[in-house]
Image: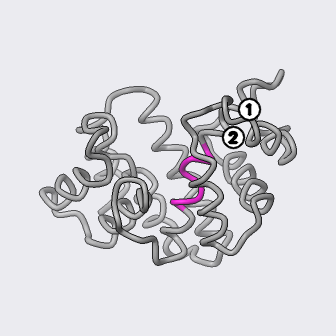
Amino acid sequence: MTKDEAVELLKKYNNGEFHLSHANIVADVMRWFACELGYGEEADFWEIVGLLHDLDFEMYPEQHCVKCVEIMREHGVDERIIHATASHGYGICVDVKPEHTMEKVLFATDELTGLIGAVAIMRPSKSVNDLECSSVKKKFKDKKFAAGCSRDVILRGAEMLGWTLDELIEKTILAMRASEHVA
């Protein structure tokens, strides 16, 4: 699947600005991590997984990570993409466990990109470019701030990767700074 094909499929099931923006941010973050972690030759694949990870969420929020499997199979999407996108709902809405490093990165960063984005918006600069890990950690502890971003999922993702929470946050901030879709 090419990026253009992935974007076309994404837009068939998503038209809300928030969902499209989130998909593009996660795609950019996944591409950055692929290159950072030594999987540069798979960067396009990681990016496509990031684009499609919430394919079903806008139209089928109650069947998230389940309906996407059906939709992707109907469109002949590679089973590796199907497994990867479904696995980001592990323990939440599906029992598809993240196995590959790429799947663990998606699991760990999906919620975290939302939290980091929310912290950045609250700053005078409204940017991740001057955002520090300590600011994110402060808001991470405040369960009422960006309450929809699961701290448990973020912590489990860091654990899956064998990273500290600080490492995960710092790397994800750097990945978001590199994204053309983040202010």
The residue that disc 2 covers is 116
In the displayed structure, 129 sits above or below 37; it is above
Front-most of 7 and 171? 171
Q: Position of residue 155 (x, y in %)?
A: 65, 58
Callout 1 environment at 10 Å: few (<14), some (14 to 19), or many (20+)? many
Visual colour scheme: one colour
Q: Residue at 42% of width from left, 34% of height from top?
A: 19
Front-most of 85 and 152? 152
User: Residue 47 colored magenta?
Assistant: no
Name the amino acid, label 2: Ile
Q: Residue at 26% of width from left, 71% of height from top?
A: 79
Residue 54 shown left or right of residue 77 in the figure? right
Name the amino acid, label 1: Ala
The residue that disc 1 covers is 120
Label 2–label 1 contact, CB within 8 A: yes
Q: Which contiguous range is marked in magenta? A: 106-113
Front-most of 73 and 64? 64
* Residue 56 - label: none
Main SS category, magenta section: helix
Q: Position of residue 43 (x, y in %)?
A: 52, 67
Q: Residue pushed farthest left? A: 74
The residues tagged by marks 2 and 1 sit, at their Cα atoms, a distance apart of 6 Å
Q: Residue at 74% of width from left, 58% of height from top?
A: 171
Residue 117 shown left or right of residue 66 in the figure? right
Q: Position of residue 8 (x, y in %)?
A: 28, 44
Q: Position of residue 105 (x, y in %)?
A: 57, 64
User: Residue 109 colored magenta?
Assistant: yes
Quarter of image, res 90: bottom left
In this rendering, the count of numbered labels is: 2
**What is the secondary structure assignment of the residue under circle 1?**
helix
On-image quarter of the N terminus: bottom left
